[in-house]
Image (cartoon, rainbow, N blue to C red):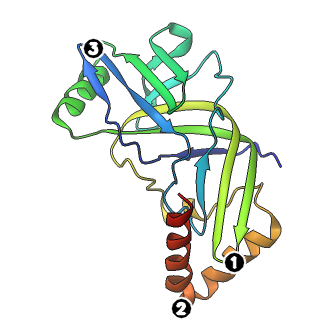
Amino acid sequence: MKTSKVERRSYHVERRSALAGNTLTGYIAVYNSRSEDLGGYVEMLAPGCFDPIPDDVPALMNHNIDLCVARTSAGTLKLRSDGTGLAYSIDLPDTTTGRDLKVSVQRGDVSGCSFGFICRDDEWIAAEDTVLRMIRSVELIEVSVGVTFPAYTGTSSELRLLPDSMPVEIRSRIEARETNPAVDWIADTLLRLKLAEAL
């Protein structure tokens, strides 16, 4: 099923961004890596889900549209999908934002990356104690560097904005858990154990 809702995600990326001169490199996202709990389900990115990469993708500072530090159409942002995930290279601008980002990365104050996307194809895999959303194809809208929290940190209301593509039976199950929090810790523990075994 398809949705036109713009979603934003941050995934655990083991490789920290590297800075050489004014060039910042790293991975925006990695394939086959489990996301944080997104409100009753977790996600994984299928290899190649970003292909084809759009011709015009901005790189923002912490998802702030007023703080654009690079752009693919300008040649200042390079994006490449490889066997690991979505790799990036940014030529930082000689602007206040660019200099601030460089200093913050050098100091280790910020290290996270994130991305905004429209899901074009996904698959929901639900067992008794597991809900996994495998994202197979996305339209990349923007990438963000200098993200303060590498793990997904949306507010509780943002976490509960369930994707339109979620099957009705899964949506009902997640919404039912929200109204009966007494059993949440059992379900969450089983979910973590099952996913740990699967990965």
Q: Are marks 3 and 1 in contact (CB under 8 Å)?
A: no
**Badge 3 or badge 1: first in the primary sequence:** 3
Three-letter amino acid code at disc 2? Ala
User: Circle 3 sits in a helix, a strand or a loop, which is it?
Assistant: loop
Task: Give the alpha-carbon distance from disc 1 to disc 2, as whole Å.
Answer: 17 Å
Q: Among all residues in the image, which is located at the extreme bottom?
A: 182
Look at the image and tell me whether residue 64 can be seen. Answer: no
The label number, if any, that marks residue 179 in the structure image: none
Which residue position holds label 2?
Answer: 182
Three-letter amino acid code at disc 1? Glu
Which sits in the foreground, 57 or 195? 195
Badge 3: few (under 14), some or many (20 or more) residues near its Cα, within 10 Å? Answer: some
Closer mark to the observer between disc 1 and disc 2? 1
Badge 2: few (under 14), some or many (20 or more) residues near its Cα, within 10 Å? Answer: few
Which residue position holds label 1?
Answer: 128
- Return the x and y of residue 11 as percentages of the image width and height: 47, 47
Q: Among all residues in the image, which is located at the extreme top?
A: 75
Residue 175 versus residue 154 in the image, above or below = below
**In this image, 103 relative to 151: left or right?**
left
Q: Among all residues in the image, which is located at the extreme front?
A: 197
- Residue at (75% x, 60% y) in the render: 166
- Residue at (44% x, 11% y) in the render: 76
The label number, if any, that marks residue 22 in the structure image: 3
Residue 15 versus residue 21 in the image, above or below = below
